[in-house]
Amino acid sequence: MQKLSSSLEDYLEQIYIQVLKNGFAKVTALSNALNVRKASVTSALINLADKKLINYEPYASITLTDEGLKLSKRIYKKHIVLNKFFNEVLKLDNSAEIACAVEHLISDKNLAKIEKFISDNIY
């Protein structure tokens, strides 16, 4: 799998969330969700399309390629697991913000350890 910058991971994750909701993503929705200018979104989309992670044409709906879907699911899973850990286990006030920061740094191996800890201790 490709290694992306934290920013591109955030875009890919948000595209995945939009695709889950609507079947596609749009520049304006991404701009609003990420609180960035449309020009920044367009630049990121071109970059993700060049990496063959999304299907993007100006003024058209944005969808994920097969590789983009795999990668975005992995990023989203990291966010969900980490948010659950920081919120339900550690009971941190700003769990979503911390999860968003840590998801870009944590390895799959360490994430699996946290996921196991959660399943062994919460359910």
Image (cartoon, grey):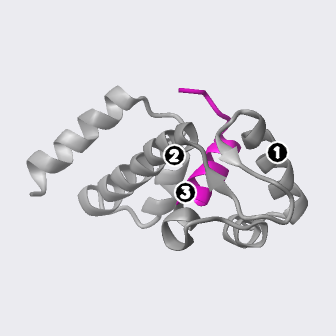
Q: Amino acid at mark 1?
A: Ile
Quarter of the rendering containing residue 80: bottom left
Q: Nearer the viewer, residue 12 or 10?
A: 12
Q: Which mark is residue 32?
A: none
Determine crowd level at label 3: few under 14, some 14-19, many 20+ residues with C-alpha closer than 10 A. many
Q: Which residue is mark 1?
A: 46
Amino acid, disc 2 = Leu
Residue 48 in the image: above or below residue 10 = above
Q: In the image, residue 42 lies at what x, y percent?
A: 85, 55
Which of pointers 1 and 3 lies earlier in the amino acid sequence? 3
Give the image location of residue 60, x and y in percent: 79, 64
Q: Amino acid at mark 3?
A: Tyr
**Which residues, given as a range, are shown in magenta?**
1-16
Under tag 1, what secondary structure? helix
Q: Secondary structure at mark 3?
A: helix
Looking at marks 2 and 3 on the same chain, the residue that comes earlier in the sequence is marked by: 3
Contact check, label 2 and label 3, Cβ < 8 Å: yes
At horizontal 55% and vertical 63% (from top left) the residue drawn is 19
Q: Would you call the spot at circle 1 few (<14 residues within 10 Å), some (14-19), or many (20 or more)?
A: some
Q: Magenta span: helix, strand or loop, mainly? A: helix
Pick the front one: 76 or 103: 76
Q: Look at the image and say whether residue 102 sits in the magenta stretch.
A: no
Circle number at residue 69: 2
- The residue identified by callout 3 is 16
Q: In 3D space, how far apart are the residues under numbered discs 2 and 1 (Cα atoms)?
A: 17 Å
Q: How many marks?
A: 3
Q: In percent of the image, x 77 and y 65: which residue is there?
A: 27
- Residue at point 61%, 58% (across, down): 15
Quarter of the image holding residue 89?
bottom left
In what element is the residue under mark 2?
helix
